[in-house]
Amino acid sequence: MKIIKRVVDIRKETETLRKDGKIVGLVSTMGYFHDGHLSLMRRAKKECGKTVVSIFVNPAQFGPGEDLKKYPRNFRRDYKLAEKEGVDYIFSPSAEEMYKPGYGTFVEVETLSKIMCGRARPGHFRGVCTVVLKLFNIVNPHRAYFGEKDYQQLVIIKKMVKDLNLNLEIKGCPIIREKDGLALSSRNKYLSGEERENAAILNKCLETAREMIGGGERNLEKVKGCILERLRKNRFIKKVDYFDFRNTATLEEIKKIKKEQDKILAATAAWVGNTRLIDNKIIKV
C-alpha cells in the first residue's frame, strides 16, 4: 500500500492505472476509521481493480466554533486498518496542498444545501462539495463510495455529479451500527459512558417512526410530534436540530403519506451532550 501526499503524484498513479485498464475506486474520508469506513473499502475492493482511500480533515466544511481542531485523528491506526483491507493507495494531503494560498473557488448545490443539516451548519455542504469535487478531479475514479448515514450528503453529491456532468458512478453503502443500533461515527468518541448509553435513542426513535407508519399512521406531523416529545424527555439530549420525513430522492419534506409513496426517509440530528449526531432510516410504506 502506497501513501501519497501530493496531488501531482496521486494523479500520475491513477492516470497510469486507467491506461492499464484498471477500474479505480475512491473512498473519501476524514480518517479515524471505524467499521463503517471499512465497509466502504471492502465494497470498493470487491467492485474495483484498485482502491484509493483519501484521508483529509477538510477545514472548509467546519464552521466557526465547530470541532476542526479536536476532530479525532490517528494516521498510524488508519494505515494499519486500510492495509488489512487490501487498500492500494492512501492519499493524505495537507490543507496547504489542497487549498493553495489565495484559494477562492467553492462549489454548492444550492437548494439541497440549505435544509436539514445545512440549516444547522451554514456553509457545511459548500465545503463538502468543494473538497469532494477536488478529490474527483485529482484521483479521477470510475466509482466513489459514500455511506448512507450521511444521507443528505449522498443525495447532494449525486446531484452535483449529475448537474456538472461528471463521468463517474456514486455508490451509496448501508449504515453500519453497534449492537444497540447506534450508527457508527468518528464523533462517537466524544461521548461519555452515560451519553453513549443514551445515544442509541436516535435509532430507537427512527424505529418507533417505522412502527407507527407500519401500523397505518399516515399523518407524519403526528409521528414527528411523538418522536420529538420522546427525544426531549431524555435528559442527555440537549438539542434536536431536526426530525424530518423526506423524499428519498429529492429530500422534499413529506408531512402526510400519499398512496403513490412506497418509501420515505426519516432523518434526525440531535445533540447528545456536546456531541452532534445524525441518523436516518428508509421506511417502506
Image (tube, grey):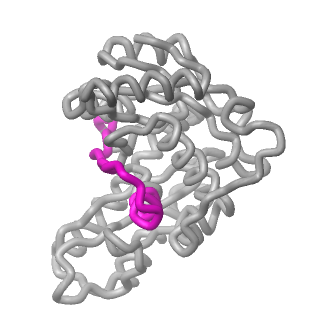
Residue appearing at x 46%, y 46% in the figure: 199
Residue appearing at x 25%, y 34% in the figure: 43
Residue appearing at x 72%, y 46% in the figure: 66
As drawn, the residue found furthest toward the front would be 19
Region of the chain picked out in magenta, as a range: 155-179
Residue appearing at x 25%, y 29% in the figure: 21
- The picture places residue 219, in percent across and down from the top left corner, at 31, 87
Q: Nearer the viewer, residue 39 or 176?
A: 39
Q: Does the magenta segment cover residue 189?
A: no
**245 above or below 105?**
below
- The picture places residue 267, in percent across and down from the top left corner, at 41, 63
- The picture places residue 232, in percent across and down from the top left corner, at 53, 64
Q: Does the magenta segment cover residue 158?
A: yes
Quarter of the C terminus within the rendering: bottom left
Please indicate whether residue 57 sits to the left or right of residue 31 in the image. right
Q: Nearer the viewer, residue 230 or 14?
A: 14
Q: Is residue 202 visible?
A: no
Quarter of the N terminus within the rendering: top left
- The picture places residue 270, in percent across and down from the top left corner, at 54, 57
How many tags in the picture? 0
Image quarter for residue 85?
A: top left
Q: Is residue 101 visible?
A: yes
Image quarter for residue 147?
A: top left
Image quarter for residue 237?
A: bottom right
Q: Nearer the viewer, residue 186 or 181?
A: 186
